[in-house]
Image: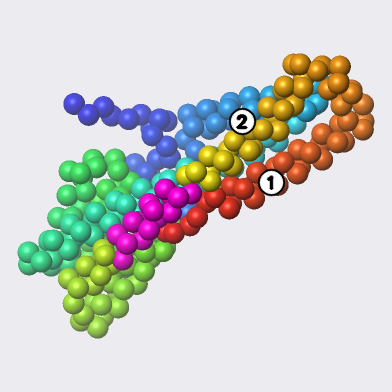
């Protein structure tokens, strides 16, 4: 039996629960996620303050590190959610194309494809929730192309937005829906395959960037544990604090630059 996931464990509430449409361009922490990542950020911040300043007086600076960490996690989780939405939308297009080839109308094809998504990923899947909302709106005679344009605008995914626009144009001009769906599905598959290839190549670069990011902290820790008399000259005086602060700023800038260089946007 499938376990029901509590609301505070599964991320932000979905549209089916709240009645609001999810904006995938902005990620919102659940309560549990906020507590977890805030605690992680504060621990990392406390370690940074201890390494760089070695005084409890500077501990409020750990909050700055925690805020920076929360921002990074929000960006990371938001990107993961958009990637998941894109992958599942590819499967939805495949199912919709199959239904259209079997002779279903566009609206009935959306219903059948939505049922397939529930069987594949469950009712709590982010795209299953969105398609369920579209199916409910179809029962109120809402235009299917307008519903997908709305999903595309909220998704933050270029291909979903293009699909909504192309669907609207195809319906107005009386084009071939089956050919349009196959073309959209093929293009999305090619993009996902390209992303996977790039991720494979970039994995080594990200690993190197992570190791290089840890090296300054490890060097400082090594000096503090083995040459305490040498390292203590950097603590307890304004010049040392200023030098450490400047080093932290440069480190933060280098970390952000390295993260940006190893993150390649394909979708």
Nearer to us of marks 1 and 2 is 1
What type of secondary structure mainly makes up the magenta span?
Answer: helix
Compute the Cα span from label 1 to label 2: 19 Å
Q: Nearer the viewer, residue 98 or 190?
A: 190
Which residue is tagged 1?
Answer: 254
Residue placed at 17% from the left, 49% from the top? 116
- Give the color scheme: rainbow, by chain, secondary structure or one colour: rainbow
Badge 1 or badge 2: first in the primary sequence:
2
Q: The C terminus appears in which quarter of the rendering?
A: bottom left
Q: Position of residue 20 (x, y in %)?
A: 39, 50
Residue placed at 70% from the left, 42% from the top? 252
Q: How many marks?
A: 2
Please say whether residue 46 is visible from this viewpoint: no
Q: Position of residue 38 (x, y in %)?
A: 58, 30
Mark 2 element type: helix
Is 52 within the magenta?
A: no
- Give the left or right position of residue 257, taking residue 238 as reference: left
Q: Residue 226: which numbered mark, if any? A: none
Q: Residue 41: which numbered mark, if any? A: 2
């Amino acid at each position: 039996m499938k376990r029901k996931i509590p609301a505070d464990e599964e991320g932000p509430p979905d549209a089916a629960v709240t009645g609001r449409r999810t904006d995938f361009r902005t990620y919102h922490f659940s309560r549990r996620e906020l507590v977890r990542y805030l605690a992680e950020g504060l621990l990392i911040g406390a370690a940074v303050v201890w390494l760089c300043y070695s005084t409890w007086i500077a501990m409020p600076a750990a909050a700055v590190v925690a805020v920076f960490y929360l921002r990074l996690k929000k960006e990371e989780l938001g990107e993961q959610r958009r990637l998941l939405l894109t992958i599942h939308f590819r499967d939805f297009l495949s199912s919709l194309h199959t239904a259209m080839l079997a002779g279903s109308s566009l609206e009935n094809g959306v219903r059948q494809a939505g049922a397939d998504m529930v069987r594949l990923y469950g009712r709590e899947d982010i795209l299953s929730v969105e398609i369920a909302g579209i199916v409910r709106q179809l029962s109120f005679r809402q235009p299917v192309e307008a519903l997908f344009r709305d999903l595309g605008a909220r998704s933050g995914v270029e291909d979903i937005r293009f699909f909504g626009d192309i669907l609207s144009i195809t319906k107005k001009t009386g084009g071939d829906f089956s050919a349009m769906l196959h073309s959209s599905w093929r293009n999305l598959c090619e993009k996902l395959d390209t992303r996977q290839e790039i991720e494979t190549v970039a994995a080594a670069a990200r690993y190197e960037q992570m190791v290089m990011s840890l090296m300054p902290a490890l060097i400082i820790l090594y000096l503090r544990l083995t040459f305490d008399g040498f390292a203590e000259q950097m603590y307890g005086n304004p010049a040392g604090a200023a030098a450490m602060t400047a080093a932290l700023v440069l480190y933060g800038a280098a970390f952000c630059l390295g993260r940006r260089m190893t993150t390649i946007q394909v979708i």
